[in-house]
């Protein structure tokens, strides 16, 4: 990688070390879930109700779709660890857990969106599938000097329904890590945008 490209990525807020840092965080998080014993999972109807609540809250507060994906990812990670001690108390705490996750992300988003804020947009500590895909799109723009910016915007919109179905279908796990799903969606988007041959 040339010095010029590294500088371009830095200016875009995408330093070269960002991908390895995100990947390492993801591995650590799923290692915690894998260590949880005995194995258990959130009942599907409970998870679906939680996801519907998070979606409604994002719509009510006019937050971008990416906030919902981050909220779902945080909920799944939290539940993968907590489900090892599956109990009525843990399930009863699900509404409070959803509220806490949403409140954290809402405040984080609003702090960055404020005109008084001098911060760059916060990078999630636990990147979701959409976080990974957005990062790949921004890197692609930086590396191609935005020659395909309109195609990258189209990809972001076009893969959203598929990303939503993937998240609704099953919680993320080490086998279905957000990084892998984000890379897969980005590659599918490249094919659909006819930027690479099938």
Image: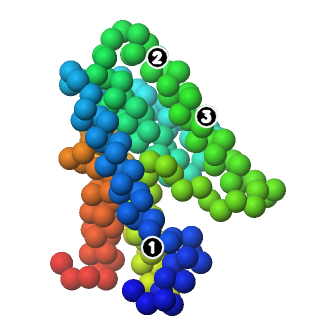
Q: Quadrant of residue 119?
A: bottom right
How many neighbours does mark 1 have within 10 angstroms: few (below 14), some (14-19), or many (20 or more)? some
Q: Which residue is mark 2?
A: 93
Q: Nearer the viewer, mark 1 or mark 2?
A: 1
Q: Is residue 86 above or below residue 52?
A: above
Q: CA distance from mark 1 to mark 3?
A: 31 Å
Q: Residue shown at 32%/36% (left/top)?
A: 32
Nearer the camera: disc 1 or disc 3: 1
Q: Which mark is residue 3?
A: none
Reading the chain from its start, which is encountered first: label 1 or label 2? 1
Left-right relation of 140 to 61: left
Q: Position of residue 31 (x, y in %)?
A: 28, 40
Q: Is residue 65 visible?
A: no
| Rendered image quadrant of residue 89 | top left
- Work out whether 162 lies above or below 106: below
The single residue placed furthest to the right in the displayed view is: 116
Q: CA distance from mark 3 to mark 2?
A: 15 Å
Question: Which element is circle 3 on?
Answer: helix
Is residue 108 visible in the rendered structure shown here? yes
Query: According to the image, label 3 marks what residue?
Result: 103
Q: Secondary structure at mark 2?
A: loop
Q: What scheme was used to colour the molecule? A: rainbow
Residue under the image location 51 percent in, 78 percent down:
9
**Residue position for label 1:** 16
């Amino acid at each position: 990688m040339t010095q010029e490209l590294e500088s371009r990525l830095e200016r875009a807020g995408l330093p070269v070390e960002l991908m390895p840092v995100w990947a390492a965080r993801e591995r650590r998080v799923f290692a915690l879930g894998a260590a949880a014993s005995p194995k258990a999972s959130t009942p599907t109807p409970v998870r679906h109700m939680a996801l519907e609540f998070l979606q409604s809250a994002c719509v009510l507060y006019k937050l971008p779709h990416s906030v919902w994906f981050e909220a779902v990812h945080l909920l799944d990670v939290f539940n993968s660890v907590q489900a090892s001690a599956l109990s009525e108390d843990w399930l009863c705490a699900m509404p409070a857990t959803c509220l806490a996750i949403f409140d954290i992300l809402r405040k984080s988003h609003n702090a960055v969106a404020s005109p008084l804020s001098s911060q760059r947009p916060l990078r999630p500590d636990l990147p979701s599938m959409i976080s990974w895909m957005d990062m790949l799109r921004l890197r692609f723009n930086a590396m191609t000097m935005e020659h395909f910016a309109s195609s990258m915007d189209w990809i972001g919109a076009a893969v959203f329904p598929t990303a939503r179905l993937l998240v609704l279908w099953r919680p993320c796990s080490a086998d279905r890590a957000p990084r892998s799903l984000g890379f897969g969606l980005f590659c599918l988007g490249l094919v659909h945008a006819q930027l690479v041959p099938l």
